[in-house]
Amino acid sequence: MSVLYDYFSAPNDERAVTVLQVEGGPTAEESGFDAGTLGGIDPVVQLGTLEALLTGVPYDEVTDDPRAGHNLAMSDDYDRIVITVTDALAAALAAADDVRLAEAAEPWSQTEELEGADPAQLAAFARDLAALARRAAASDHRLYCWTSI
């Protein structure tokens, strides 16, 4: 069984949860969301670590944020979940240039959860997520993750 993680933006939590009604989630053409299948990076531990690396805030403080990996809504059959992404991570991603993202990818690849991951692939994920974060910021939107099991 594999888990899919699609990141997307929405103006607010109420709009974000409507993605559960869309067959195929936020990347479906008819969803109306700005989204991308950006890779197998989980929105809780792995993105929390990226946030700590980009912001300099200790991981334990990152996870204290009420939006850090908060399960916002779940489908009736529990196979699809909408999870919040912190505003701090969205802002850090939007502000980071490609050099900064590549610098963060190196220590990120050495974490227990990502051990053996290619830093170049992690940097590419971070660049794509940063582009989504920039578009979200320009539209006054927040970031979310649609998880499908």
Image (cartoon, rainbow, N blue to C red):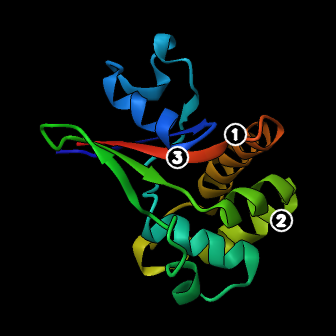
Which residue: 56% across, 60% down? 118
Q: Quadrant of the N terminus?
A: top left
- Asked which quadrant contains residue 76, the reply is top left
Residue placed under numbered mark 3 in the picture: 144
Along the line of sight, the residue nearer the viewer: 47 or 118: 47
Mark 1 or 2, which is nearer the eye?
1
- Visible in this render: residue 116? no
Residue placed under numbered mark 2 in the picture: 100
Mark 1 neighbour class, 10 Å CA radius: few under 14, some 14 to 19, many 20 or more: many
User: What number of labels is visible?
Assistant: 3
State the CA–CA distance, disc 1 to disc 3: 11 Å
SS at mark 1 in the image: helix
SS at mark 3 in the image: strand
SS at mark 2 in the image: helix
Mark 2 neighbour class, 10 Å CA radius: few under 14, some 14 to 19, many 20 or more: some
Q: Amino acid at mark 1?
A: Leu
Which residue: 68% across, 56% down? 123
Q: Residue 145 location in percent, x, y? A: 47, 46
- Asked which quadrant contains residue 58, the reply is bottom right
